Image (cartoon, rainbow, N blue to C red):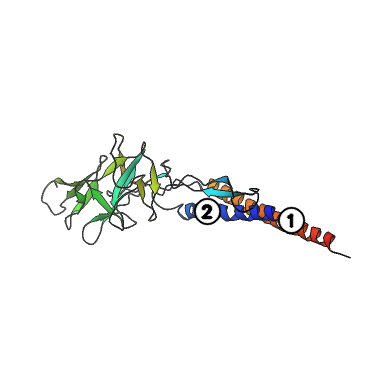
């Protein structure tokens, strides 16, 4: 009976990884540009050790591969908000200084004029961080061009190109989720841009997490946990019954 209880307990432990992934998705349902990861699969592995090889244990196989399916688009009317279409991702500076990628496009100049998104990540241009001149208005075009306009200029204000957002097409490039939540290709760093790059200005993209689907999966995890606990209790009951039968009267 110990094999039965051992396997059920291992199943509970390994499925905790999937539950953690699911609760993270639910926590980011309202996060701008959040993308789901592929799910966690279970496989059976043979346990090696003294005696007969008579045990197998479930093992979780997690993946951090990003699903770039689109989220809900929300028109904001703000000239620095962008939604990335298709497989487009934007290059940002990660907290450790690396180049990473995101779909979060709620961009604003910070106190120093550096263009950052709502998570505080610096938006990278082809030549480095994009800095907005003090007092200038900013707008972003469909191709990622960042233009500044002097509102104090007499007459029609001319738009000046101050940078080009680092945009890449990841529709054919698998991306993984980093520990800081940003995306990166399998080998890290930058990758080739691709051709299908486009933005929707004055719009933000919501999370691609389906609340109904996530709640259904959470219920399934809960029922699986309860079933494994019942197996462990039943194994204990059977073991106690067997022990009582062997006990001398």
131 with respect to 95 (left or right):
left
Name the outermost residue toward the front: 50
Q: What residue sits 65% from the left and 55% below the top?
A: 6
Name the outermost residue toward the left: 154
Quadrant assignment, res 94: bottom left
* Residue 178: percent from left, percent from top: 38, 52
**Residue to which mark 1 is pinned:** 234
* Residue 109: percent from left, percent from top: 24, 56
- Circle 2/circle 1 CB separation < 8 Å: no
* Residue 229: percent from left, percent from top: 67, 56
Quote the CA–CA distance across marks 2 and 1.
Answer: 25 Å
- The mark that comes first in sequence, 2 or 1, is 2
Q: Secondary structure at mark 2?
A: helix
Q: Nearer the viewer, residue 234 or 159?
A: 234
Above/below status of 28 relative to 87: below
Q: Nearer the viewer, residue 49 or 18?
A: 49
Q: Is residue 191 shown to the viewer in this render? A: yes
Judge the density around disc 2: few (<14), some (14-19), many (≥20) Cα neighbours within 10 Å: some
Name the outermost residue toward the top: 195
Judge the density around disc 1: few (<14), some (14-19), many (≥20) Cα neighbours within 10 Å: some
Q: What residue sits 12% from the left and 52% below the top?
A: 153
Viewport quadrant of the C terminus:
bottom right
Query: Any mark on residue 158, and which?
Result: none
Q: Secondary structure at mark 1?
A: helix
243 with respect to 27 (left or right):
right
* Residue 191: percent from left, percent from top: 29, 42
Above/below status of 221 relative to 197: below
Q: Nearer the viewer, residue 242 or 99?
A: 242
Q: Nearer the viewer, residue 69 or 106?
A: 69
Viewport quadrant of the N terminus:
bottom right
**Residue to which mark 2 is pinned:** 17
Q: Is residue 75 shown to the viewer in this render? A: no
């Amino acid at each position: 009976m110990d094999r039965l209880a051992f396997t059920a307990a291992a199943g509970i432990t390994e499925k905790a990884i999937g539950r953690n992934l699911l609760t993270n998705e639910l926590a980011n349902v309202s996060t701008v540009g959040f993308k789901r990861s592929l799910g966690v699969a279970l496989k059976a592995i043979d346990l090696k050790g003294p005696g007969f090889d008579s045990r197998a244990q479930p093992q979780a196989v997690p993946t951090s591969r990003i699903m770039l399916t689109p989220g809900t688009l929300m028109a904001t009317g703000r000239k620095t908000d962008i939604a990335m279409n298709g497989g487009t991702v934007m290059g940002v500076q990660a907290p450790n200084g690396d180049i990473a990628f995101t779909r979060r496009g709620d961009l604003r100049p910070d106190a120093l004029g550096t263009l950052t998104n709502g998570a505080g990540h610096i938006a990278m241009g082809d030549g480095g961080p994009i800095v907005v001149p003090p007092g200038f208005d900013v707008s972003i075009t469909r191709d990622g061009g960042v233009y500044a306009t002097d509102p104090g200029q007499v007459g029609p204000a001319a738009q000046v190109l101050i940078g080009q957002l680092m945009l890449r097409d990841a529709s054919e490039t698998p991306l993984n989720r980093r520990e800081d939540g940003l995306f990166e290709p399998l080998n890290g760093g930058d990758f080739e841009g691709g051709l299908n790059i486009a933005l929707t200005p004055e719009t933000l993209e919501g999370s691609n997490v389906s609340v109904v689907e996530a709640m259904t999966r959470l219920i399934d995890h809960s029922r699986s946990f309860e079933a494994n606990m019942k197996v462990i209790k039943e194994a204990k009951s059977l073991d106690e019954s067997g022990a009582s039968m062997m006990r001398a009267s």
